[in-house]
Amino acid sequence: RYSLFYNRLKNIEENEGGLDKFSKSYKTFGVNQFVDGGIYCKEWAPGAEAVFLAGDFNGWNPFSHPYKKMEYGKWELFIPPGQDGCPPVPHGSKLKVVIRAQNGELLYRISPWARYVVRDEDKVNYDWVHWNPPQSYIHKHPSPRRLKSLRIYESHVGIASPEGKVASYKNFTYNVLPRIKDLGYNCVQLMAIMEHAYYASFGYQVTSFFAASSRYGTPDDLKEMIDVAHSMGITVLLDVVHSHASKNSEDGLNKFDGTDSCFFHSGPKGNHQLWDSRLFDYANWEVLRFLLSNLRMWIEDYRFDGFRFDGVTSMLYHHHGIGTGFSGDYNEYFGLHVDEDALCYLMLANHMIKFLHPECITIAEDVSGMPALCRPVAEGGGGFDYRLAMAIPDKWIQIIKELKDEDWNMGNIVHTLTNRRYEEKYIAYAESHDQALVGDKTLAFRLMDAEMYTNMSVLSPLTPVIDRGIQLHKMIRLITHALGGESYLNFMGNEFGHPEWLDFPRIGNNESYHYARRQFNLTEDHLLRYRFLNTFDRDMNKLEEQFGWLASPPGFVSEKHESNKVIAFERAGLIFIFNFHPYQSYVDYRVVCHCSLTVICKYKILLDSDAAEYGGHERLDHSTEYFSEEYPHNYRPNSLMV
């Protein structure tokens, strides 16, 4: 794998003048304005017979501005400035690339490199709008220093409002970012930013890879949003989709030059049978140029601090993970079923990002457990910094759905939270956007279900269902946060047990926005119990910020007691103790502590899920001091009683 990567990199160095120049192609492809006011246009359309540029600037004459055919399927056009020195293509004017296909048909296409596309309310398809304002947004604040550990707030700009509408970048900037900062998250991961024609696709059916979604505002609005996040010390990651592309041809990449291939594999190999989308040909030189340039554009133009790569499992294997289970056997990761070209692209992407912007962070969404995916490329690894611990949310769902409380297996919980390769960093999460979508249920909804509609008011009785749900919601999040990985992720609204599910407007729900929103206002109503969960989530993050357990070595688990339903472990100098027993409390319970034999250590309670401010029953005295003693317990020399 490293040999394949090295050869590709060497070819780029020899034929393109280096990775720096190769990945900067976003400055020359598409439609770009020169300093002198002229317009330089460049496209890759290997299957086209002829290429033209049409738009408002030439009265939509499809033949007046033909491109010149160059080598390797490239086409170029230069339009000089007007007599008054003004740009020939004004800012805000509409454009189309006109392709004469091999069968003679004229195809009106949006450039794959288009920076801004919009859709009029009375239209189905998007239009390409030339974005070149006289004064673009100027970033005022530097990016935050690279974080040792991430507390990620997974977000979607469009649903980030209690109102039933598509929310804006401005709304996120001034209403949501302060909330994220207050909750103690140091990183925001933005979904559905790359333009996607179908809103209900959650941003995963991308149509314009270089365009920030116009449904939330302008490119400058997004730049301002990222700049304000940086001013708060918040790192901003983009959920990037390079695993597949929308099948749209009128306003997408599909059949751009009139052929079945171009950016994609031709025939069945170029189609994802479950996602109904097109699959990139990662061995193609121009596809590599396109995707690498895309990453660089988001970093350098918008100042994103890194990426969460979506659908990595689909990229890594020719079977795309469809109908395939992964047990950890190494035969599953090495063989002809692995797509080495896709893996090589990921290695090139990570190498480029680390070479040009070493402060940037990359995350892999891989469910297969591909070994060394998060080791440096120089070691033959994939080059990612983190991978998502996707087994953890599945485990919590399975436990809550299938087991009685008294049947919870402490050893199985610990195994799932600690089952990761040494020195490959994982991002732990109890639930993400996947669990919030219609057809699934969030943890809060699984735990409390219909009673969330009637018994979340402090004026109503604390029923056993609500009491159990609130307590387990906090405990599940804390043990996942503290034991499950080297970073932590939460999907917006889930921190306070957002009721109901997430469903975008579509024909099946009469285009309703009722479920495509986040009711942050629920946490501000002091008569509702949502504020307890919100406060606990904030204090949990603040405590991690203070002690840094995510950046510490993995936790040492000293107890996983099946009959007592107790899990105890140490990490970052803290002792974490969880009592998952449905009805039994304990006094004088002995737990291990990591103290020197010659020193007596004093411990105090820092975070208590049973505290009144978190909706608990206040059964512990926080003024109590606990002292270690030289008393062997669970094969350790020191312990204390709690």
Image: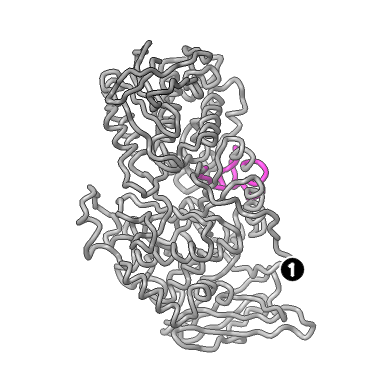
Instruction: Tell me the SS state at disc 1.
Output: loop
Please report the residue visible at 55 percent of the width from the left and 17 percent of the height from the top: 458
Q: Is residue 170 magenta?
A: yes
Q: Is residue 22 magenta?
A: no
Residue 380: quarter of image:
bottom left
Please report the residue visible at 35 percent of the width from the left and 14 percent of the height from the top: 583
Residue 640: quarter of image:
top left
Outermost right residue = 84
In this picture, residue 483 sits left or right of residue 200 = left
User: What is the x, y in percent for residue 81?
Assistant: 72, 83
430 or 553, nearer to the observer: 553
The quadrant the N terminus occupies is: bottom left
- What amino acid does circle 1 point to? Pro
Q: Is residue 636 above or below residue 418?
A: above
Please report the residue visible at 52 percent of the width from the left and 22 percent of the height from the top: 614
User: What is the x, y in percent for residue 13?
Assistant: 45, 78
- Residue 449 showing in the rendered view: no
User: What is the x, y in percent for residue 201?
Assistant: 46, 52
Q: Which region is colored magenta?
A: 153-176
- Residue 493 showing in the rendered view: yes
Q: Categorize mark 1 by other alpha carbons within 10 Å: few (<14), some (14-19), many (20+).
A: few
User: What is the x, y in percent for residue 32?
Assistant: 62, 75
The quadrant the C terminus occupies is: top left
Q: Mark 1 — residue?
A: 134
In this picture, residue 387 sits left or right of residue 294 = left
Q: Is residue 491 above or below residue 304?
A: above
265 or 9, nearer to the observer: 9
In this picture, residue 397 sits left or right of residue 184 = left
